[in-house]
Every structure is written in C-alpha cells, then in structure tokens.
Image: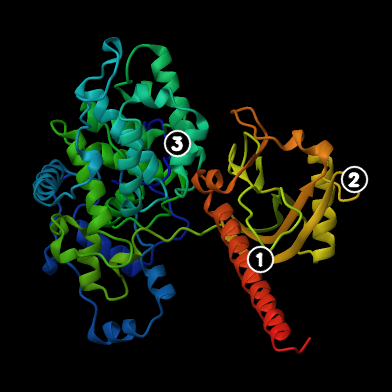
Amino acid sequence: MSGLTNPKVRGARGLGRFEFSKAPSSRSSRLIQKVNRKPHFTTATTMDEEHIEKPSKRKRNAAKAKPKEQRQHSATKEAVADIEDLFSDKEIHKIRASLLDWYDHNQRDLPWRRITQTKEIPVKEEEGEGEGERRAYGVWVSEVMLQQTRVQTVIDYYNRWMLKWPTLHHLAQASLEEVNEMWAGLGYYRRARFLLEGARMIVAGGDGFPKIVSSLLKVPGIGDYTAGAIASIAFKEVVPVVDGNVIRVLARLKAISANPKDKVTVKKFWKLAAQLVDPHRPGDFNQSLMELGATLCTPLNPSCSSCPVSGECRALAISKLDKLVLITDYPAKSIKLKQRHEFSAVCVVEISGRHDLIEGDQSNSVFLLVKRPDEGLLAGLWEFPSVMLGKEAALTRRRKEMNCFLKKSFRLDPQRTCSILLREDVGEFIHIFSHIRLKVYVELLIVHLKDDMSDLFSMRDGENTTWKCVDREALSSLGLTSGVRKVYTMVQKFKQNRLSTASAAARKRTNSKKSGLS
C-alpha cells in the first residue's frame, strides 16, 4: 500500500482533454501517434515495434551524450485523446487479469492485510465489531501511518498500535497524550490526532464504521485516497484509489508526462483509475496497482522485465525505440517548494533539589516541559522551553529572549526565585520538516528553586495542562518528537563529558595532595 497524502478530488465528470504547458515536438508527436495507432484509443493498441518509426543510428548515438534535463524535455510530447477513451475494453480486461494474477502470487505479507483477531479482547457485546469493520479499522490505521512514511518503519508501529488499541472502540477511549506517545517518531503528528478524533466521532455516532466513500469523507482526516482504500478493501465498494504509486503506474502505461501534482491532471488520473478498478475484486485490484508502484514500477529503477503489464506499457515501448526517452521520465518530476529557514532557541531547564551539581546523585532532578499550541506545527506535543528567533542570533541575544520567556511564563528569575547552578551553551543542529529548515540552538540551564517556588513546580498532569515537570524516568517514556529527543541526547552527552572532566580534575588534585605537590 502507499502512503502519500490524499488528493482532495470529489469527482471527475465533465473532464476534457489533458493540457500541457509545453507543446510536443513534431517528431515526438509522430512517434506517440504511431505507438497509439488510433488517435482516440477506441480499440486495443498494439506495442509491435514494426509500427513505430525507429530513430537513425546517428540520432541514437547523439542521444547518449545528452544530459537528463534535455531528455526529459523530449518526454513532454502527448496530445492525449478524450479521457473517456484512454483505456479500451481489451486493455482494461488484460490489465485487470494480469495485475490480479501477479498480486495473488507476489503480494507482500503485511500485517494490515490480515484481519485483526479480537476473540480474547474484552469488548462489550453492543460494541462488537464484525469482520468488515475490523478490517476497515486496520486499513485506516495503516493508510494514515503510511502517509509520508516507509513501509518497513510502519510495520512495528502498526503492530504496537493494534496491540494497544485492537478495535475502533478501544482507540476511542484513549487520550491524546497516549496516542501521541504511541506515534512518537512517525512525524506528522496531526495524523494521530485525526485518528483519535475520527474514532471518537464514529463511536459516538452509533452507526458503526462508515462503509461507503461519501460517508467516510465526513470523518476527520479521511480524504479521497484513504476513503477509497477503506471502502474497496474492507467493504468491496467499486471505487478507485490514487496516490503517488498509482499515478506513476498509470502515467507510464499511457506515457503521460504531465505534472502529477497539478489538480486538473490528478482528477484525470482518478478517472483513469476508475476505468480500471475490477468490479468483482476492487480492494485486491487497488492493492495490486499500489503494490506494483511500490515494488516494481519504482521512481528511479523500475523492474520492467518482471512487470505483469509491461506489454501494455507505452512508456516502455517508446523508450525502447527512442533513446531520448527514458521510462523514468514519466510522470514529469514535480518542482519541490523551497524550504523556508527558521531559527529557534531551546533551553533544557533542569530543576535540581541539590545545590551541588557535578558531584553526587542527581536523581531528584526534574525537567520543565511545555505543551505546544493545539493548532499548527507539532500541535499539542511536549517540548523543552523554546523561543523563535527572526534570524541567526548570538548567544547573548538568545539568552535575553529566553530569560524573558522563562520569567514571564514560569517566574524563573535568578535574582528572586531561583539560583543558577549551571548554564552552558550545548550546541546547535539542523532539523528538517517537509517545508521548514529549522536551525536549533540548544542551551542547558540547571537551577535550584528558592523555598517559595517549590509548590509552583510540583508534578502536574492532565490534557489541559500547558506545562509540567517530569523526572528522568518519565521523560524517557514520553512520546517526544525526534527533534526533542535529539535536544535531550545532546544535553545528556554534554553532562557526561562535563562529569568526566570534573572527575578527572578531582582525581588529579587528590593525587597531587598525596604526592605533596600542593
């Protein structure tokens, strides 16, 4: 299965023809017409090489020296006919049969393709879930996890998730904190929140798991792709699914090099997928199409010799006869948005119950955590105190900004409410989000609270808490983001190095005294 974000497309009626920003070259147009044989694809198209104009040896040799960028221009060549006629009945039948047979013999053994067994799990009788609903829940969880995440990474998360919340009703009873802890490390935490909100909504509705696309689209976080996957796989609704893998397969089958991110183009890919979906095995067919894109028809190194539908692939046929064209030229490479640069100062505030620092036990220390806002990036997750900076900043300015934040938010004031045991600049690192390149400056601040502040930093908990203090053990078990974990790891290494240096200095002083040198 795939895991890309769902295109928000609700239908494909009234679609005309594909439109491209670049006009096809005259030679490429002749070539594609000879491959297609008939301009509107109303009958089956053959891939026989004898019907295709072969380039001369001189042109083939010249093509080898051309850079990739120039070859890609040669792939923008289609004058694609009416969308209704892109697949003939014969093509549809052959693609369905070939893909399903291949899938039956080659599908990967993935946990979400098995029905979750719940016989030993206590569920109230009136909340019992049938086979279809259990399958739907498993498909839903897996598809949300697979968005922007590799299959091998998801398998472990999925198994642990289903062990903790094996049914929709179990998930609906969880807290957001529990869900975030389980999700930690997968990224895109908004997905986890939508899963919880969706489960609560479905259970509260009392009508069971939605079984058709139109009903599934009303659930928070479920878009066209996820709705199609759930409806076709769990409930056998004859609907298509379209994600990056499916678009790549369809684009190569029909040699379509249009921008796969363009909304109009995406709608037309949905129309193509709808033509192909098997009415008797819609779920298996959709999975076979996604499986093909994930395992054989890959972006960079497709395994065309093992592909069950290579005989119907126009991109393969063209690439064999025109060395200017590669299969990987289809679909066109979308232009990635430039990441914006942001800067953040993070302060790991450790509140110590001791006045001494390096020597002795620090097991009674606690760490200050702050909850992020409920909306926006990393919504509702816990982190160390941080402030955003408008640009790169020196240590003096970063500390000034952090001091204002700590004093305003927590009354942490070295002159009045606490004494500083240690304050050190630990280092910096770059953390990458899909659209942000964040430079993080890390600082360690260890303080001892004065008597009138002790109650303020007593342990706090609850979903409505905006900050709390946790000990080392609790901090290690929290579902922290990868960025927060990296900050904590940097601080721990810094303290270990500091401890080693201090211990070495202490031993040196002791040895000097024993030898009578001091």
Question: Observer-nearest residue: 79 or 212?
Answer: 212
Question: Are there few (<14), some (14-19), or many (20+) residues within 10 Å of tag 1?
Answer: some
Q: Earlier in the sequence, mark 2 or mark 1?
A: 2
Q: Which residue is mark 3?
A: 8
Picture disc at residue 140: none
Q: Which residue is mark 2?
A: 416
On the rendered structure, is 472 left or right of 270? right
Q: Secondary structure at mark 2?
A: loop
On the rendered structure, is 449 left or right of 170? right
Question: Observer-nearest residue: 467 or 153?
Answer: 467
Q: Which residue is mark 1?
A: 428
Question: Observer-nearest residue: 111 or 121?
Answer: 121
Of badges 3 and 2, the one in the foreground is 2
Task: Report how far apart the C-alphas of labels 3 and 2 lie in the structure.
Answer: 55 Å
Task: Report how far apart the C-alphas of labels 2 and 1 lie in the structure.
Answer: 30 Å
Find residue 156 and report its horizontal and vertical position in percent.
32, 48
Find residue 452 and report its horizontal and vertical position in percent.
84, 36
On the rendered structure, is 344 left or right of 435? right
Identify which amino acid the numbered label 1 is placed on.
Answer: Glu
Find residue 449 and report its horizontal and vertical position in percent.
79, 45
Of badges 3 and 1, the one in the foreground is 1
Question: Would you place residue 44 above or below residue 331 in this image?
Answer: above
Question: Are there few (<14), some (14-19), or many (20+) residues within 10 Å of tag 2?
Answer: few
Identify which amino acid the numbered label 2 is placed on.
Answer: Arg
Q: Secondary structure at mark 1?
A: strand
Q: Residue at x 49, y 38 (%)?
A: 180
